Structure formats: C-alpha cells, structure tokens
Image: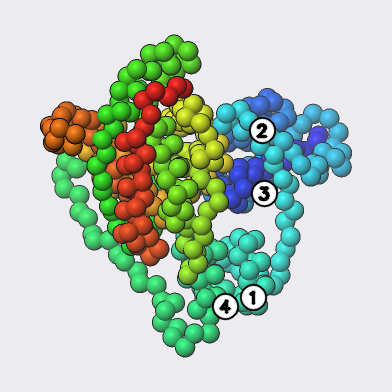
Amino acid sequence: MAKFEIVMPKLGESIIEATITKWLKSEGDQIEEDDAIVEIATDKVDSEIPSPVEGVLSKVLFQEGDVVEVGKVIAYIEMDGEASEEAKEPKQDTTQKIKEGSKPVIEEKVEEVKDESYSSDKFYSPLVKSIAKKENISLQELDSIQGSGKEGRVTKKDILGYLDNRGSAKPAVLTKQIITAPAVVAENGDQIVEMDRMRKLIADHMVMSKQVSPHVTSFIDVDVTNIVNWRNKVKDSFLKREGEKITFTPIFFEAAAKALKDFPGINASVDGTKIIYRKNVNIGMATALPDGNLIVPVIKNADQKSLLGLTKDVNDLAKRARANKLLPDEIAGGTFTITNFGSFDSLTGTPIINQPQVAILAVGAIRKKPVVMETEQGDVIAIRHIMILSLAYDHRVVDGALGGMYLKRMKELLENFDQNQSI
C-alpha cells in the first residue's frame, strides 16, 4: 500500500512550530479526503489539519501537547494501491487546506538535515543555529545562554542580547533575576480552574511586556459630539445599503492612522539600542472573545484605507475573531494597537503595550456631560458627548512630550470630524 505523509503545515511567515492540542482520529481509523485529523495551535491561532487523501491512519508520530517544527511528519496514512517512489516521497510543495476561513495554506516539505556541530539535548531553532554559526558560538557556549522562550528555549532576542554583551568585562549583566510568585493557598469552597492555553499565552505576554517596557500613560478628553451626530444620521441608511452596522471604531482607526503618520515615533519598535520606525501603519484591534480571552486582529496599511474600507475590515475581523476563523497572518505584523474600554462602559484605563510595539491607545466610554464652551457671546455651558483617550507608551523611546502631542493630534482630528461627509 502507498504511504502518505501528513506534515506540520506552514501557518504564517513568522511561525516555525505548532503544538498538537488534540488528535481527532486514532491509529486504525478510516480517513476520508478533507477529514480533520488533528487540532494544532500556535501562539497566534488555532487550526485543524485536514487529510488531502483517503485511507487509514496507520501511525501517529507525536502525542497531544508535543511542540512540532513546521515541515516535520506528524502521521502516516496508508492508501490503497501500490507504493511508489512518488507516494513515499511527496513532491516538494503540498497544498493542504486549513480550517480557518477555508483558505489553502501552502505547506513546504522541510528536509531534516542532521547538524553534527549542533547536536544537543536542547532544542534550537534553525535561525538561532544560523546566528550561532555565523558568530562562531560553540555548542557549549550556546548551551550556557539563558533562554526566555517556552521551556527556557533560546530565542533570537536572547542570542542577539548575548552577542551585545559577549566579551564584556562585567559578565554579571548576563545574569537574569528570577522573580518568584508568592505561594497561594486555596481555602475550603474555592474553585480551582486551570488556565486554558490562550490565557496562559496572554498572561506570559502581559508579564513580559511590563518587564520589557517602562510604561507611562497619558490621558486627554475629547468632544466627539460631531461624530455622534454624524453616526446617528447615517447608521440606518448604511445598514440598509451595506447590510452591516457602522460603529465608532473605524472612525477612531482613521484618526489614529493619520496621527501615526504625523508622529512616526509612536509607530515604532525597539531592538536593543536601535529604534525601528515602521513604514507600514498596521493597527491591531483588541477583541474580546466569548470565552473571556483576547485576540488582536490587525488591519494592514490602515492609513491607505477609506472610512468605508476601514468599516468593512473592522466588522469582518471582529466577526471572524469571535468565530475563531482568523488566519495566522491576520493577527501578525501589528505596529500599533487600539483597545476599546468603552465597549464595557469603562471611562478609561491604562492598557499594557502589545510588544514589540511602543504604544497602545485605549478608547473610553462616550458620556453626555455639561461642558463650558467659548462662543463669540462669551462662555456657555452645553451638553456635549465626551470621551477619554489614554495612551500607554514605552518610556525608553517615547517621552511625555511625544505621547502628549500624539494625543493632542488625535483630539484635533476627532473634534474636527466633518459632519457632512458621506460614506
């Protein structure tokens, strides 16, 4: 019989491995074409791997919970018919469909190359090995580097940080302080629930962000009465014409993108002592999921989209995020993030930066308030729609002046919103 290899598919440009979370089929099960065989997860998104052939699942090579590199064989399917060299060794590129949005993912067959110079009990990614070879780092030296990745793995950031300090007269700078959480004792009647995989990833990411960036948060209040009036005027006709709602979110995205072009220091990242000013304006939209977790789909090139285009993107990404239908590349590449505290009626908040970005904008609830307004006849008190914006930023590279100027520009753009524009 012909043997077909099921390999770990490539799920995005930056993803080199995935975790097997659940086998949907067992050894000996009959498999139909397009049957989902296994559920996998990355730090970006969950997916299923369907079978491109029919046959019998003859061998499972990894267990649930195992982390597997992209391109590695994870199972074999025995197909009817004589085995041939072609069947035994599938072509270089195999196309498999991934459940997310029913879009095909091109899977690259990665040939396992045994690297005798880096044979260690520890796992090192091909990128880390490549950097080590280029910089003449021995295996013993590589093994001594403190890893910050999962299960202590050495990441690109770890090895580059090591190189920055290599040969320093003060080796103590390489010592990593270990912070231990206080012991917690459950009392009678307490309910103990293990975090799910996504919550663990969120927790690790939040702690890492606070350790990496000194956070500062600035606030500004904004009169959004013009925006509220405009939306009330167009929302019914927009719903009738487009079949979907128009919210305030795309308006905030439009203003944020324009302000980022004016202040590129907010649309940046930090790499050691280098500041990377991003060319593209890719804004992440923090989205709460039904299970209480959080995911951040990204609107790419937001500065190049019209208000209608942003509205379509916001509605589509939010809908598919809540249905677990996002593709890995749709939650990668963000250069700035917006989170909406106002959707839960919170006035404001101090958000945590989504690394490796240097700032995150929080939008508060819109409330009617009495406001003193200047007129030609003198000051008057009027009822206006007021919202608080908060910007958390990385004080290593963003000072209060830059953070304040960005918020001031956001205020100007939102308060001068054109009530007569069409969409």
Q: Earlier in the sequence, mark 1 or mark 4?
A: 1
Q: Does residue 181 appear anywhere in the picture?
A: yes
**Amino acid type, mark 3:** Lys
Residue with the mark numbered 4:
141
Which of the pair 58/136 is nearer the observer?
136
Q: Residue at x 55, y 47 (%)?
A: 280
Residue with the mark numbered 3:
72
Mark 2 closeness class: few <14, some 14–19, many ≥20 residues within 10 Å: few
Mark 4 closeness class: few <14, some 14–19, many ≥20 residues within 10 Å: few
Q: Does residue 192 appear anywhere in the picture?
A: no
Q: Nearer the viewer, mark 1 or mark 3?
A: 1
Asked if disc 3 and disc 2 are in contact, CB closer than 8 Å, the reply is no
Asked if disc 4 and disc 3 are in contact, CB closer than 8 Å, the reply is no
Mark 3 closeness class: few <14, some 14–19, many ≥20 residues within 10 Å: some
Q: Tell me the distance, in whole angstroms, between the alpha carbons under discs 1 and 2.
A: 38 Å
Which of the pair 372/346 is nearer the observer?
372
Can you give x and y, in whole percent of width and height, for residue 413 in the image? 37, 39
Can you give x and y, in whole percent of width and height, for residue 114 in the image? 72, 63
**Amino acid type, mark 1:** Glu
Q: Nearer the viewer, mark 2 or mark 4?
A: 2
Can you give x and y, in whole percent of width and height, for residue 29 in the image? 63, 29
Q: Tell me the distance, in whole angstroms, between the alpha carbons under discs 4 and 3.
A: 27 Å
Residue with the mark numbered 1:
135
**Amino acid type, mark 4:** Glu
Q: How many marks?
A: 4
Q: Nearer the viewer, mark 4 or mark 3?
A: 4
